[in-house]
Structure formats: C-alpha cells, structure tokens
Amino acid sequence: MESISRKSLATNNQLLSVSSNKEQADIPVDTSINHYELPNLTQLLYDFTNKEQDTILRCFRTGNYNSLRDLPPNLLPNSVLKMLREKQDENLAWKPPPARVEKLTGGGLFKDYEYLPDGYDTFLKQKQDEKRERDR
C-alpha cells in the first residue's frame, strides 16, 4: 500500500511524499489553489448538446418564439448554432439608423424668418379694412 504525507507548510508549493516498497518519489503540489477550485471532468463536457434539435422542434410548436424563417435553408450539422450565433452578433452590433431630418441653413428644422414687431391693433385694423372693401 502507498501512503501520502505532506511535508512542511512553509511554502505555497509543497511536495507530496509517495512511498512504496519499490521506490520513493516526491510529487510537486501547488497549495495556492484549493482542492475545490481544481478543474474536473464536468468543465470539459459540453453544456447542452441538443440545442439544435430543440431549436428546430420549437419552430413547429404553438406559442413558440422561434420561427421557420430564422432557420438556415440547409440543415447541416452546426448550421443552426452558427445561425443563432450570427443572429446574436447582429443584434449586439445593432445601431439606431441616422436621423432622417435634415437641418437647414439656420441650424434648425425651419427656415429663419425676420421678426417684425407688430401689434394686435394692426391686425384688427386690417380686418376692418377688408370688411369695408367687401361691403362696397
């Protein structure tokens, strides 16, 4: 049987002593990383392998949010995932279209006009003159 024992705790990089009846070897161990932070097999596996199949099935169900027009014309392996990735990138890169209102020479939406101070009395006088001409 093999026995594993830790040597001194003086440094971050420690050595494990593995002793067997044939040979003895020292294995370097990095103790600056906790054992639960070490990578394991689940980090190497895929997150979700049926994403393409589920996307296609959702296109044919009622109340779906995927549509047939979003699927690529040729359903090849990874083509649906590629299409989804391209659609995400397109949505992330979207910018609002430029404004269609063109500014005129005055810097605003309307042409500049000269302001002439005019009293309300002149308007009433003009209306009275028009009424007199109509009455004749």
Image (tube, grey):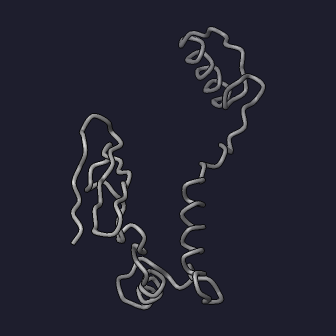
Q: Horizontally, is 22 left or right of 3 in the view?
A: right
Q: Quadrant of residue 92?
A: bottom right
Q: Horizontally, is 79 left or right of 53 in the view?
A: right
Camera-side residue of 34 and 14: 14
* Image location of residue 118, percent across then percent down: 61, 10
Camera-side residue of 104 and 52: 52
Q: Horizontally, is 68 left or right of 51 in the view?
A: right
Q: Quadrant of residue 42?
A: bottom left
* Image location of residue 69, percent across then percent down: 57, 82
Which residue is drawn at the image coordinates 60% and 61% (left, top)? 90
* Image location of residue 95, percent across then percent down: 60, 49
Count the marks. 0
| 111 to 59, vertically: above or below | above
Quadrant (top left/top right/bottom left/bottom right) for the C terminus: top right
* Image location of residue 120, percent across then percent down: 53, 13
Camera-side residue of 81 and 117: 81
Camera-side residue of 92 and 98: 92
